[in-house]
Amino acid sequence: MFKGGVKLLDFKELSKSEEIEEFKYPEKVIIPLSQHTGAPAKPTVKKGDTVVEGQIIGEAEGFISSFVHSSISGKVVSIENYPLPNGRKSLSVVIESDGKNEKIEGEKKDWVSLTSQEIIEIVKKAGIVGLGGAAFPTHVKMSIPPGKKAEFVILNGCECEPFLTADYRVLKENTEEIIEGLEIISKTTSVKKSYIGIESNKIDIAEKIERAIENKKTEIDIELKILPEKYPQGSEKHLIKSITGREVPSEGLPIDVGCIVFNVQTTLSIKRAVCDGIPLTERVLTVSGLVENPKNLKVRIGTSISEILKYCGGKLGDGKKLVIGGPMMGINIPSPDVPVIKSTTGILILPEENLPETIQPCIKCGKCVEVCPMNLVPAFISKYAESENWEMCKNLNVLDCIECGCCSYVCPAKRPLVEFFKWAKAEIKKRKI
Ligand code: SF4
Ligand code: SF4
């Protein structure tokens, strides 16, 4: 188990028992060409073109980039800049539905006979990225760099952010397919031992997972690990520590300690792309918090968040805020007029917090140091960030901060610690310190 972290009220009972429901076919979608880590995709369609669901509308530009597909059938009405849920803008393809609901028929394949390179190419062309929120292109993660070796594949079923239950439902409702996805990843990366990590608040699906493991198709050894509920158990580095005891070095990557970690929905998307020829055009997300009907919805990429909120009875105003993602690491956004993108894990309406109007001084209580799962000293780093001393922030390893929010959560002075660290990281990168 890792040091630090916090025990949070999880509020998962609001949506945990809600079966995944398919959200209505949208009349219009806004599909950003930059919804992943790396270079934006290059548009392959133009205004006036007719498209069908699953058709490529954006081509990956380089290795760290991703393909983008249409999520409906219809007509491209414009290609212009639109705001994303993360506040940035991206060139986006706007498509209006023609009501025909046509799609590209996927080609079924027996993955056992495919080479690793063929599988990685399929994953790339299917536009698959990390669906846990990071949106890192999955074909890159599956391509083990020269000189490195993957020993363990870890399926991350923790979903440790409060309120979110989409991954839990996906794992519960698609267990066999996800185990097959895990086998595909393990074979592609030449790994013989894989783990599935879930927190103890999902113990009710453990038996189903064990049964699916017994029915697996290959000799790959898959082991289920039930982990204690502690935030941020689902962070890659902490999951690796909890399961294998290995520590990812400062500024290092999981592959540096022989591990690669995949999210539940990413793994399912890999299985469907490889076996059924289905590209990534939809995802499951949780709508919860102060909404009348909390749900786990399967939503087409590009669907308006505003429409989803209306459907679930979510109203803003009166001291309420809109958060995209979980309450700890999610982003507070001013308007719901943005589209769902591949990394949208949740849509939450939460009460506004009463934050001090000015930044309060640190009272040196040490609580932030106790909870930091990265062994940082948030109190010191925040002081140096406040005085814009970026060298000292770097020396105190701010680049290792995973922005989990544990320090801000416990700080009695309500100092905006994570905001300081995001700022410091951006300045260090910009100034190449
Ligand atoms: S946000 Fe960064 S500094 Fe704060 S607890 Fe998490 S890792 Fe530590
Ligand atoms: S928790 Fe807040 S007040 Fe306490 S030491 Fe850390 S920054 Fe200072």
Image (cartoon, helix red, strand yellow):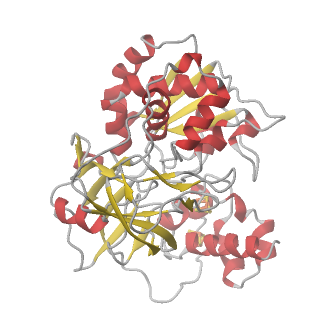
x then y, percent, for residue 148: 79, 34
Can you see residue 259? yes
How many marks overall? Answer: 0
Can you see residue 227? no
x then y, percent, for residue 287: 28, 56
Which quarter of the rendered picture does the C terminus lie within?
A: bottom right
x then y, percent, for residue 283: 37, 47
* Picture residue at 38% right of the left edge, 67% below the top: 48
x then y, percent, for residue 78: 40, 72
Which quarter of the rendered picture does the N terminus lie within?
A: top right
* Picture residue at 75% right of the left edge, 53% below the top: 251
Residue nearest the viewer, comparing 93 with 16: 93
Q: In this view, does 108 lie to the left or right of 65?
A: left
Q: In this view, does 65 lie to the left or right of 217?
A: right
Q: Is residue 376 left or right of residue 211?
A: right
Residue nearest the viewer, comparing 129 with 313: 129
| Residue 52 against residue 223 in the figure, above or below | below
| Residue 30 against residue 17 in the figure, above or below | below
| Residue 354 against residue 70 in the figure, above or below | below
* Picture residue at 51% right of the left edge, 42% below the top: 126
Residue nearest the viewer, comparing 107 with 405: 107
Tell me which corner region of the image, top left, top right, bottom left or bottom right, holds residue 219.
Answer: top right
Tell me which corner region of the image, top left, top right, bottom left or bottom right, holds residue 342.
Answer: bottom left
Tell me which corner region of the image, top left, top right, bottom left or bottom right, holds residue 184.
Answer: top right
Image quarter for ligand 2: bottom right
| Residue 225 against residue 433 in the figure, above or below | above
